[in-house]
């Protein structure tokens, strides 16, 4: 269960976005460093890119799945998920 609030206008709330970005960062680190994920040396590239540029790899199915799962856990709408994907994936 998430502690992030469910309310309209969340994507315009800087505090919400920072908290959610921190959550994604934590999940991303766990995802890409898990041996079964198969990232190997590329794990640090994926993680560091998100830390520095706030961008996730567009074509990476594992990262996209993790991102959508995190969004669904805090009950973001499909429109909110699409908006964040357009901001954070490249």
Image: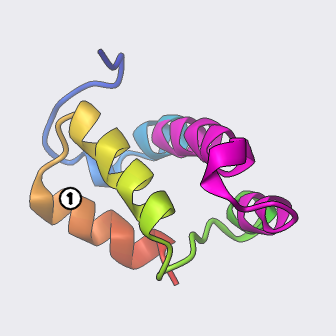
Q: Quadrant of residue 65?
A: bottom left
Q: Residue 74 appears at what percent x and percent y?
A: 26, 32
Magenta-colored span: 20-47
Tell which of 28 and 2 is nearer to you. Answer: 28
38 part of magenta stretch: yes
Q: Quadrant of residue 30?
A: top right
- With respect to residue 54, does 22 lie above or below? above
Number of numbered callouts drawn: 1
Give the residue pinned by disc 1. Answer: 80
Residue 59 left/right relative to 10: right
Q: Residue 80 appears at what percent x and percent y?
A: 20, 59
| Crowding at mark 1 (Cα within 10 Å: few <14, some 14-19, many 20+) | some
59 part of magenta stretch: no
Q: Residue at x 80, y 61 (%)?
A: 48
Tell which of 49 and 62 is nearer to you. Answer: 62
SS under mark 1 = helix
Magenta stretch prevailing secondary structure: helix
Q: Residue at x 53, y 35 (%)?
A: 23
Tell which of 73 and 88 is nearer to you. Answer: 73
- With respect to residue 16, does 17 lie above or below? below
Q: Residue at x 60, y 45 (%)?
A: 31
Q: Residue 42 appears at what percent x and percent y?
A: 80, 68
Q: Quadrant of residue 39?
A: bottom right
Q: Residue 87 appears at what percent x and percent y?
A: 43, 74
Tell which of 29 and 79 is nearer to you. Answer: 29
Residue 67 left/right relative to 75: right
By what rule are the colours in the image chosen? Answer: rainbow
Q: Quadrant of the N terminus?
A: top left
Residue 81 left/right relative to 24: left
């Amino acid at each position: 269960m998430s502690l992030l609030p469910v309310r309209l206008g969340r994507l315009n709330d800087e505090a919400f976005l920072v908290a959610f970005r921190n959550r994604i960062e934590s999940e991303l680190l766990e995802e890409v460093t898990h041996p079964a994920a198969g990232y190997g040396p590329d794990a640090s590239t994926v993680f560091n890119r998100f830390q520095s540029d706030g961008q996730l790899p567009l074509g990476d199915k594992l990262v996209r799945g993790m991102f959508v799962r995190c969004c669904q856990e805090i009950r973001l709408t499909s429109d909110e998920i699409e908006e964040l994907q357009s901001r954070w994936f490249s």
